[in-house]
Amino acid sequence: MATSNVKLLGALPSSFTLQVQLALNINSVKYGAQVPPSSLLIPMITPSPFSGHPIFDQKFFPPLEVIGATQDEKERTVAIKQVVVILVLLEEAFVKCSEGKAFFGGDNIGYLDITFGCSLPWLRMTEKRRGVQLL
C-alpha cells in the first residue's frame, strides 16, 4: 500500500480538526500524524461544509462560548436559552430527516452529522464546567 502524502494540521480538541479527521476516516483516506501548529489552518485550507452557515456560526457556537466564558449570570442564562433553542431545532430536524435511523441522512452519515457530532465534546465540556444541562 502506498504511503499517503495527506497531513492533518490541527489540534485534537478543535471541532474543525475533528470534522476533517472524521471525514478522512469515513472516506478511508490515510493521513499523517497531527501536527499541532493551529487548528485555525484547517478552515482556511479546507472550509467546513457549514462555514458561514447561520445555525452553527451565528446561533450555536457564540452562545456556547458565552456559557463557558462569562461570569455574568444574566448573560449566561440568555446564552443557555439560545443554545437550547438551537438544540431543539436540531432534534426536530433529526427526527424528521433521519426517519428513525442513525444519521440526519438516514443510513448515511453526512455533513450535518459530522459538524454537529464534532461539537458534542465542547458541548459536554461546557455542561460539566458550568454545571448546566443542555442536552
Image: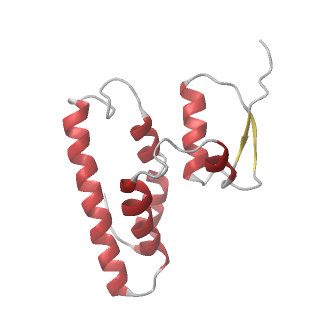
Q: Residue furthest top?
A: 1
Image point (30%, 68%), residue name:
82
Image point (33%, 32%), residue name:
103
Q: Quadrant of the N terminus?
A: top right
Q: How is the image coloured?
A: secondary structure
Q: Is residue 63 left or right of residue 44?
A: left
Number of marks in picture: 0
Q: In this view, does 44 lie to the left or right of 77?
A: right
Q: Height in image: 32 above or below 91?
A: above
Give x and y (percent) for residue 72: 40, 87
Give x and y (percent) for residue 50: 45, 46
Q: Height in image: 135 above or below 30?
A: below
Give x and y (percent) for residue 22: 55, 35
Image point (75%, 52%), residue name:
36
Q: In which quarter of the image is the C terminus?
A: bottom left
Q: Height in image: 103 above or below 86?
A: above
Give x and y (percent) for residue 92: 20, 46
Image point (65%, 49%), residue name:
44
Q: In this view, does 119 lie to the left or right of 80?
A: right
Q: Height in image: 86 above or below 103?
A: below
Q: Which of 48 and 18 is in front in this view?
A: 48
Q: Residue furthest front?
A: 52
